[in-house]
Image: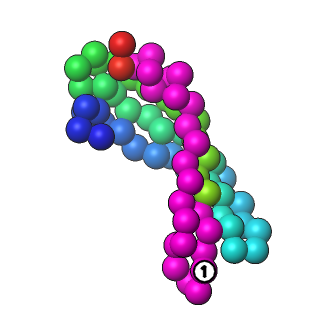
Amino acid sequence: MAEWSSFAPGPTEFIAEGDTVVSLGVFTGKHGATGKSVQAHYAHFWDVKAGKIARFRQYIDTLAVAEARC
């Protein structure tokens, strides 16, 4: 995260099923070295056990992120 001058998640939807919660959204930010902005869609998956996060997975539009870094 140190290479980004700004970077923030913008959740647009939450889906819950059983012990799994999914957040869909868009990361927005600006790369510190290139000055390029990014809008990268993401999906976050949380598995919850006994009221605590047991596992986290993230999927993101890596092409959008890579293009902002070049």
Q: Secondary structure at mark 1?
A: strand
Instruction: Please check the rendered image and state whether residue 37 is part of the magenta-colored stretch, yes or no.
Output: no
Task: Locate residue 59, reporting x and y percent.
Answer: 58, 42
Q: Which residues are magenta?
A: 46-68
Task: Locate residue 9, reporting x and y percent.
Answer: 46, 46
Q: Nearer the viewer, residue 60 or 40?
A: 60
Quarter holding residue 33 = top left
Residue plotted at (59% across, 63% down): 46
Amino acid type, mark 1 = Lys
Residue plotted at (40% across, 43% down): 8
Residue plotted at (71% across, 60% down): 15
**Quarter of the figure that contains the C terminus:** top left
Quarter holding residue 45 = bottom right
Instruction: Please check the rendered image and state whether residue 54 is part of the magenta-colored stretch, yes or no.
Output: yes
**Quarter of the figure that contains the N terminus:** top left
From what the image shows, is residue 48 above or below residue 64? Answer: below
Residue 57 showing in the rendered view: yes
Q: Nearer the viewer, residue 33 or 13?
A: 33
Task: Locate residue 5, reporting x and y percent.
Answer: 25, 33
Residue plotted at (55% across, 37% down): 60
Task: Locate residue 36, reporting x and y percent.
Answer: 35, 18
Quarter holding residue 30 = top left
From what the image shows, is residue 32 above or below residue 56? Answer: above
**How many marks overall?**
1
Residue 12 showing in the rendered view: no
Tag 1 residue? 49
